Structures are given as structure tokens and as C-alpha cells.
Image (cartoon, rainbow, N blue to C red):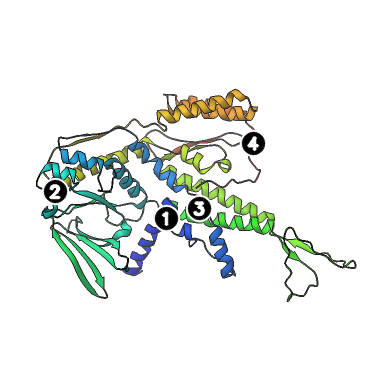
Amino acid sequence: MSEENEVNQLRASYKLVQDSYLGDGGYLTGEYLHRYRREGHSDYSERKEQAYYINLMGPIVDSIVKPVFNQKITRDHISDLYRVFEEDADNKGCTLTKFMEKAITTANYMGQCYVVMDSFKEDDIPPTLKEQINNRKLPFVSLKTPLDVITYETDDFDKLTSITFFHKRLPDGTIKYRKYDSETVLEFKIDGEEIIVISKVAHMMGILPVIPVMYGDVLPTPSAINMAQMSKALYNQVSELRELGRDSAFSLLVIPGADPKVTIEVGSKSTLFVPRDVTNMPTYISPDTSINANSLDEIKFLVETIISQGALAGAVVQSGSISVKSGVALAFEFQGTSEALNSNADISEGLEYKVASLFGTYTEPFIIEVEYDREYTPFNTAEVGTQLTFLKELLSLSISEDVDNEIKAQLLDLLRYNSDMDTDRYLELKSKIMSARTGDVVSEVVPKEGYMGQFDTIEDVGSDDSGSFEALEQ
């Protein structure tokens, strides 16, 4: 494979991963749908319009990042300018905490991203500290992804020395680029084979004002590519299942002996009259129902595989019968292991020190201490209270034994997540509750101590052969 093909393939991987996390791009346009053999253009276009994406990847990635930033973050320093920066890091109103969360999230599914620090021209910066704060003439950050990278250079030790990013597309279609190195920021555009310099500013820092968030390669293989490929496969399988369902609901009418040149419009509310002497009556044909069952099994397999990929990344899944879980419910149940959360907290802390150092180089150096609390709980106090009240009210209604057992199981989950309940004791109690339920499968995936990637699986006796699949909410 040529170098150009390798670059194009890598960019395609980044695009797929980004779209799979956001539910964007080809999932919105339908371009990620594979065309059937012998599928007509109009049929394919209609199927693209009707397709929808079940986003499991987003909740999985968020589950090992969001808890880090739901905790208290302490930043101890004496810089008045940096305090203003903390409240508006990107000069667009985004706090430093939110910006860091976005950076760590992006790095977790893309494999890499870059924090870029820019500032105003020296002539535009007011002379007094008060004016700088009031007019927000401070350094600011922006986030770039591997998709924004055009070229880069490294030294003999593979340390990044310069990097060029896509900057913006102008209304007339012109694309502006920015190249950063240890001395200047060069903004340019390309006209044919000619590079036209728009501006060249010396930042006078002596270091590259670009921070790769993750250690390692500048452009690595995206870390969530396998999960993204599974998400794309699931997207196609759901579309195919829906197509089979529509074909079964709106079957094809077969009329023996009818002239194939004659078009007969028959709807669900219309009437077809036939002669009294007709012996072969018109009939409807539709796809074999076994095809639907096979497609449904494939969907269940893909959902379980995507969840398994999330488990390897550090997300712990507690679920009953997956076929009746909504996307919101699955998002609620994804909880990052302490190993994955602590790793992301370490990366974010290290990144904050680098950002503060760059900021001090632009303004004036200062000492800072950053500490992330690491007491992770799945839910905050307000969520626990709301959920507890709701479940207690439902339990008091005594709707049915099965419903009561379901409520008790959820109450037990809340108790486990907000107490020091032993895992074995939790599984024992959960098993007793779930054994009273009918037609359900219990699957608890619990990380073994000492190694994030190994799991014990406990399955209760039961089956769910109803063949139903409720589409997970995006």
C-alpha cells in the first residue's frame, strides 16, 4: 500500500470513529449504508432516508470520562489572569473544566488530539492587567483532532517540532491553514500549487504552542476503531431488519395471469375485484420470517460485542435482557472502572500543568497545583434522590410481582453503588430477586481485582425466546 493510500485509510478511520461517537456524518446522510446487490437507486435512496443510528459508542466513551469531571478539581495558584482563563478558556465562554473534558473525551475515541494555545498580537494587548481582564485580551486554547492535521514534522527523537492544521473554510470556498512551530504562527491558503501567506506572527515563546493530549504517535490508529466498525455494522443490520419488516407488512401482491405491462395500484385500504370464475386467487408474498430471526440474532450479537469492547476499555455493564434496554438505560448503566477513570484523571492533570505552563510563557510564569478528586460514584446526590423517590412510589403501587421484583433489583443497584456493599453479597441478593422473575436472563460483568481486562460472568437460569427487539434510543 502506498503512503498516500495509508494516509487516506487512516483519515477514513478517524472520520468513522468521530461519526460513530457523535452519530454524525454518514449516519445522518445514510452514506454508511451498504447498497444491496441489485438494489435500485431509488430504493437505496429511500432506505438511506429511513435509516437511524443506535449510538452505543457515545455512552460507553462518556462513561470513562464524565465521572472524572463530575468530581471536585482543585487549582491552587496566585495568577489573576489564569483565574479569568479558567472561566473562559477558549475565548468563547467554555470553562477550562469543560474544555479539558472535551479534550480527554476526544482523545479516548480518536486516540489523539491537540490543545493549541494562541494569543492576541502584542500591539492589541492593553498595557494594564485590569484592561487585559476587562477586554479579555488573554491567551486562549482551541482543540484540534487528527482530522485537522495536514502535515507535521518531528526531530530525531520523534518530538513534535511543527504542525499544520486546517483552520477554517471561507464563504467563497477558500481554505485557510495554520502552521505552528517554536517561533511563529503562519496562516496561509493554497491557490493551485501556490502557497499564499496571509499572516506570519512571531509568538516569541521559543516552544511549540501545541500540546498532544496523549503520549505516543502524533497520528496513531484511532483507539475506538473496532467499536466504530461494529457500530457501522449494527447500523446496516438494523436498516436491513427494518426493510424486512416493511416488506412483510406491505407484501407483494401476485396475480396469476395478469398482464405484466399493466400497473395495478393496490393499497391497504383499497379493494381488488376478480371474476367469479377465477380459480387461482391473487395472493401476497413476503420474505421468509426466518430471515427476520437471523437478522435479529445478528443485531443482538453486535450489541453484545460493542458492549464487550466497552468493557475492555474500562466500562462495566450491568444489564438484564439487552433486548428490552433503551439507549438511555444503557447509558445510565455504563460505569467506568477505577483504573480507566484514574488513567484519564492522570492524563488530564498532566495536560493542565502543560496548559498552565504555556499560559505563563505567554503572560508571566506562575506556580500551580492541580488535583483531581478520585471518589467516583455512578450518580450524584440529586440523581440518587430522584431515582429513589420514583422507585419507592412505584413499589407502593404493587402493580405486579414481576414489576415489584424489577423495582427491588433497581433499588439494590442504587444501594450497591452508594455503599460499601461487598460484590459477592450484591450478586447473591440480585440472584434471589432475579430468580423470581420469569423469562429473563441475568448477566453481571464484574472486573476482577488487579486487572481491568478480566471478567467473571454469572448467568442465571432462564431464557427469552420472544424474538422481540426494541430499538435502542440514540
Identify residue for label 1: 19
Q: Is residue 432 something that shows in the picture?
A: no
For this orientation, the residue located farthest to the right is 277
Query: Residue 283 at what x, y percent from top left?
Result: 78, 62
Identify residue for label 3: 53
Element carrying mark 2: helix
Element carrying mark 4: loop
Q: Nearer the viewer, residue 129 or 444?
A: 129
State left or right for residue 427 relative to residue 217.
Answer: right
Count residues near mark 1 (Cα–Cα under 10 Å), then give few for <14, some for 14-19, many for 20+.
some
Sooner in the amino-acid sequence: mark 1 or mark 2: 1
Q: CA distance from mark 3 to mark 4?
A: 28 Å
State left or right for residue 54 relative to residue 130.
Answer: right
Q: Nearer the viewer, residue 202 or 271?
A: 271
Identify residue for label 4: 439
Residue 336, quarter of picture: top left
Seen in the picture, residue 272 relative to 259 is either above or below; the reply is above
Sooner in the amino-acid sequence: mark 2 or mark 4: 2
Query: Residue 189 at what x, y percent from top left?
Result: 24, 68
